[in-house]
Amino acid sequence: MEAVSTTRFTLRDAMPADTADIARLVRELAAFEKLLPHARGTADSFAEQLFGMRPAAYAMVAEVDAQIVGLALWFYNFSTFACSRGLYVEDVYVEPQHRGAGIGRAFFRAMAQRALEQGCARMEWSVLDWNTDAIAFYRGLGAVGMEEWTVQRLSAAAIATLARAGEDLSAGER
């Protein structure tokens, strides 16, 4: 993506040199969401996941006066029903003092452009039900809540337990 500039901010693709700021912004987001103990990413682990041999996700940053003040991070998933890629927005975060400048909307517009270029059938993300400001913002973008769906999650420990459970199955049950 070419850098998008306004008089207030610049959006650009993240680079390996940005990973300390990415880790910092993710920690700030986790603190806001009251989930800080779960934010374990470091500059090194973000470097591996975003810029390693097999990137797991993609990111762009927002800069104001050459300082990184915002982050958008996404990955591609797949819809069997649409038989198409989707773009899953994992995190969008803008430092509080820079909110209201259009950075969040610019992030979503840039991701929508990527989704369109990639032939994605949809963009999706999750939002905490108590974050009414974010929900209102998303509605303003044209997003609709998926009330009939609930997120299901296996933790790392539950994944290991489930994976080991298969060791007890006979070959005929697999």
Image: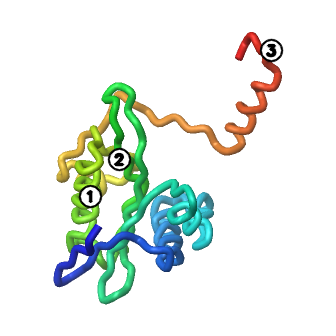
Q: Residue at x 29, y 67 (%)?
A: 1
In the displayed structure image, the side of residue 147 where residue 102 appears, left or right: left
- Which residue carries the number 3 mark? 170
Picture layout, residue 172 above or below residue 67: above
* Residue 147 locus on image (x, y percent): 33, 32
* Residue 74 locus on image (x, y percent): 40, 55
Q: CA distance from mark 3 to mark 2?
A: 38 Å
Q: Residue at x 28, y 72 (%)?
A: 99
- Which residue carries the number 1 mark? 108
* Residue 61 locus on image (x, y percent): 36, 72
* Residue 138 locus on image (x, y percent): 25, 51
Picture layout, residue 35 above or below residue 144: below
Residue 44 quadrant: bottom right
**Is label 3 in contact with label 2 (beta carbons under 8 Å)?**
no
The one nearer the camera, 17 or 130, is 17
Mark positioned earlier in the residue sequence (3 or 2): 2
Q: Residue at x 42, y 42 (%)?
A: 77
Q: Residue at x 22, y 74 (%)?
A: 4
Q: Element type at marker 2?
A: strand
